[in-house]
Amino acid sequence: MYAIDLFCGAGGMSEGILQAGFHILFSNDINESVELTYTNRHEQLGYRQNYNTFFRRADIRELTGEYILQKIRDLEFWNAEERNIPDDIDAIFGGPPCQGFSLAGRRNADDPRNMLFREYVRVIHEIQPKYVVMENVTGFMNTRLNGFIGINGDVYDNEVAPYILTQELNRIGYNVLEPRILDASNYGVPQARRRAIFIAYRNDVIEPQYPISNQNSVTAITDAIGDLIRDTQIRIDVNPELTRYQLASINGRTPNINGETIHSNNIIHNNELSAHSNIIKERFSLYREGESTSNLRERIQAQGIELNNCNSLVSYLSKNLNITEDKVITTFRNGNVGEEMLNELLTKKNMRRRLDRNNVAATVVSLPDDFISPFENRTFSVRELARLQSFDDSFEFLGPRTTGGDRRKKEVPQYTQVGNAVPPLLARAVALEIARVLQQ
């Protein structure tokens, strides 16, 4: 089964596609950092550029169906391994950039990136694969677009994006299943991540289905990353033996070109931790599991909080509030504090949350300092978040670990690569449904 992955990012969707038994012939993304990660992983799996796969870093507006098909026809392994060049591509997968649709930030219906799904439809029209899968954020489902021009010149005014996508695919010969929002936690991913999924199929092939969710098989945070706790005694107490999920991450789920999975060999890539000051560690210690900053603020005002064990934080507060350390402890113990004092204690950042070890993680995002580990007073490593996304341990993220300032506009650091990815196990569940009807 042969597939194409567009807007592939670091390769979360591709991991699931490969796990479902597809061979990815062509993939594309615009960013240099994700190209490093993506091509490195595929070389590790035995997918060699120009031999049995082709990756092109480019804006999708620069790509044509004929270019993609020609690059596929030019692959060396058709002749070297006496394989038949397929008449049809079995499936195209893709997740066009979604910043304009996202509920996480300021939504902008006029964001030019919203129009990239039109380019996705154009490429589908030019290649005519049997099946099409598109993934996007849930905000895509109710975003209205004005003056959207379809690939055949049709103009849509004040129509929701799913209606436009369905109409455009219908016009080029595809049936479209009713779009669904799938939660990754129902497919083995230890994370509550809801994503809009669209599945379309050519008029001459078998109708596929959405994967059946398994709400009774949820992987909690401890089951996913308990073995990565740094404090030895905490790790022994919390995670005395490797779980099934941890073993799968270590042994590998994604097969190489020969059908063999890649074992991590006990090498834990991307597991560096941020260097927190004592003040930050003590600030983190104030959070209970599952508690957000706003919850913590309410608790302090209602019940007070004990700061006796937070020497660095108390000293900092004493200096900034110009009161004695004893007064700091007494004041916060009584809960007699206003916004100014709470801001000094916790900072103005309200998005922070300590995750609950017995539940799935909140949606993994691109900023690493939004979440506090349930086990230790720190944020997560890239590897821990990759585990929560269901990446194999052998999958190495390349490029800068994190970045800031103006560089955020150009760089896609490791944390962002992880946060932007489609969880491989969610992609696998969808791809297996396409594989099922192809095999029929």
Image (cartoon, helix red, strand yellow):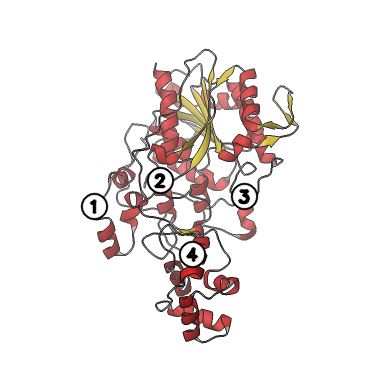
Few, some or many C-alpha atoms within 10 Å of disc 2 (few <14, some 14-19, many ≥20)?
Answer: many
Question: What residue is rendered at 31% in x and 55% in y?
Answer: 227
- Spatial CA span between label 4 and label 3: 23 Å
Type of residue at label 3?
A: Gly
Q: In the drawing, what numbered circle is on residue 296? A: 4
Q: Quadrant of the C terminus?
A: top left
Residue identifier under label 3: 105
Type of residue at label 2?
A: Phe
Q: Earlier in the sequence, mark 1 or mark 3?
A: 3
Residue identifier under label 2: 395
Which quadrant of the structure image shows residue 82?
top left
Q: Quadrant of the N terminus?
A: top left
Report the mark closest to the observer, 4 or 1. 4
Tell me: residue 42, above or below residue 164: below
43 and 303: which one is in front? 303
Type of residue at label 1?
A: Glu
Question: What residue is rendered at 48% in x and 18% in y?
Answer: 207
Residue extending farthest to the left is 241
Type of residue at label 4?
A: Leu
Asked whether the viewer can see residue 401, the reply is no
Question: What residue is rendered at 62% in x and 56% in y?
Answer: 407
Q: Position of residue 414 (x, y in %)?
A: 50, 52
439 displayed left or right of 200: left
Q: Secondary structure at mark 2?
A: loop
Q: Position of residue 360 (x, y in %)?
A: 40, 48
Q: In the drawing, what numbered circle is on residue 241? A: 1
- Spatial CA span between label 2 and label 4: 36 Å
